[in-house]
Image: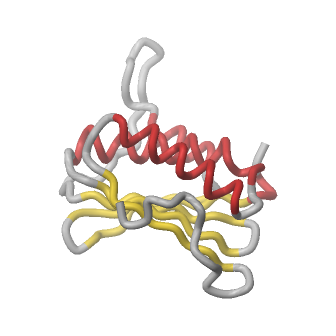
Amino acid sequence: MKNPNPIPPPPISDDTWEACWELPADPETVGTARRLAREVLAAWGLPALADDVATVVSEVVTNAVVHAKSPVTFSLSRRGRSVRGEVTDRGAAWPTLLAAGPDEERGRGLAIVAAYADRWGVEPAPEGKTVWFVCAEWRSR
């Protein structure tokens, strides 16, 4: 991990904070990423975002671990009262929003991301892709 300490470093500016971790391609990584997200949001004074961000992180990290089968770089950045998350993996295939039927066990991940994030998208990375999302405190439930 780049930053094994869940407490974020000092702010970059008055309202901007960042935290970043290197995580293995392992199913346990999903729970670790959720825990890190919750701990960092609490330290940043944004506990109202914890459920939404943890839900999105769970889906995006799961996709990276299951489909890319590569280590991931997971980062969160706070600007004011919103948080941007990024999950970068080495997989070539981009995520696709699927229409899952009621009896299907898979295919709802990106629909969940779209429901809980204010915005999300995919960008190319030097060796793969980055799935990003933004959650703002005003929207949290």
Where residue 82 appears, as percent x and y from the top left, is 69, 65
Asked if residue 135 lies left or right of residue 33, the reply is right
Residue toward you, 67 or 78? 78
Residue drawn where x is 42% and y is 12% of the image: 103
Q: State the quadrant of the N terminus.
A: bottom left
Asked if residue 41 lies left or right of residue 32, the reply is right
Would you place residue 25 above or below residue 81 in this image? Answer: above
Residue drawn where x is 38% and y is 19% of the image: 105
Residue drawn where x is 31% and y is 56% of the image: 72
Where residue 78 appears, as percent x and y from the top left, is 64, 70
Q: State the quadrant of the C terminus.
A: top right
Would you place residue 75 above or below residue 31 in this image? Answer: below
Would you place residue 104 above or below residue 28 in this image? Answer: above
Residue toward you, 50 or 56? 50
Question: Looking at the rendering, which quadrant does residue 88 occupy?
Answer: bottom left
Question: Looking at the rendering, which quadrant does residue 12 occupy?
Answer: bottom right
Where residue 135 appears, as percent x and y from the top left, is 65, 57
Residue toward you, 52 or 23? 23
- The residue lying furthest to the front in this view is 5
Would you place residue 13 above or below residue 7 in this image? Answer: below
- Picture colour scheme: secondary structure
Residue drawn where x is 57% and y is 74% of the image: 9
- The residue lying furthest to the bottom in this view is 13
How many labels, in total?
A: 0
